[in-house]
Image (cartoon, rainbow, N blue to C red):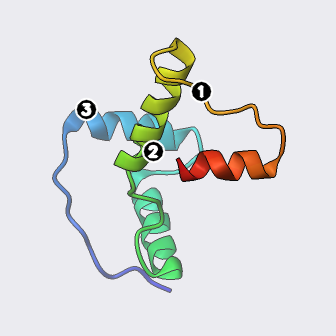
């Protein structure tokens, strides 16, 4: 299909140079990379990558802090348990 639409971008010259270097390793130009991005966006019906931050949410952070406190001895550890009933009793406390 002939390409008839143009998109003009303004971007930091250093970013442009950096991505040109990256894309050239794959034998492609920025234009070809943008086309791949747009085709993939159409294929998936949105952005073709995950935008969620890599940081844990507040619940996970609290659990991580609790484990660190247990490891350091600031908070008592749970278990080991002799059986499932003991484990379930501990969960209720």
In the image: residue 38, left or right of residue 92: left
Percent x, y of residue 58? 35, 46
Mark 1 or mark 2, which is nearer to you? 1
Q: Residues within 10 Å of mark 2 (few under 14, many from 20)?
A: few
Q: CA distance from mark 1 to mark 3?
A: 51 Å
Q: Residue extending furthest right? A: 83
Mark number for residue 60?
A: 2
Callout 1–callout 3 Cβ contact below 8 Å:
no
**Where is 8 relative to 65, above or below?**
below
Separation (CA) of disc 3 from disc 2: 37 Å
Contact (Cβ within 8 Å) of mark 1 with mark 2: no
> Around disc 1, counting alpha carbons within 10 Å, would you say few (fewer than 14), some (14 to 19), or many (20 or more)?
few
In the rendered image of this protein, does residue 44 appear above or below residue 12? below
Q: Secondary structure at mark 2?
A: helix
Residue at the disc numbered 1:
77
Which of label 3 and label 2 is nearer to you?
2
* CA gap, disc 1 and disc 2: 18 Å
Disc number placed over residue 33 in the picture, else none: none
Q: Residue at x 51, y 13 (%)?
A: 72
Residue that protrudes farthest toward the top in the picture: 72
In the structure shown, which secondary structural element does the residue marked by tag 3 occupy? helix
Query: Label 1's element?
Result: loop
User: Residue 82 at what x, y percent from top left?
Assistant: 83, 38
Q: Could you say where residue 23 lies in the image, as x and y percent from the top left? A: 49, 44
Q: Above or below — where is 19 with respect to 32?
A: above
Q: Residues within 10 Å of mark 3 (few under 14, many from 20)?
A: few
Q: Nearer the viewer, residue 81 or 65?
A: 81
Q: Is residue 75 above or below residue 49?
A: above
Task: Identify residue for label 3.
Answer: 14
Which residue is painted at 53% across and 29% down in the image?
A: 67
């Amino acid at each position: 299909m002939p390409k008839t639409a143009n998109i003009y971008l303004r971007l930091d010259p250093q970013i442009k140079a950096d991505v040109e270097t990256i894309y050239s390793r794959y034998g492609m130009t920025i234009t070809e990379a943008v086309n791949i991005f747009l085709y993939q966006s159409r294929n998936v019906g949105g952005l073709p990558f995950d935008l969620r931050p890599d940081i844990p949410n507040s619940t996970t952070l609290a659990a991580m802090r609790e484990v660190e406190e247990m490891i350091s001895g600031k908070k008592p550890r749970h278990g080991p348990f002799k059986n499932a009933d003991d484990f379930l009793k501990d969960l209720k406390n």
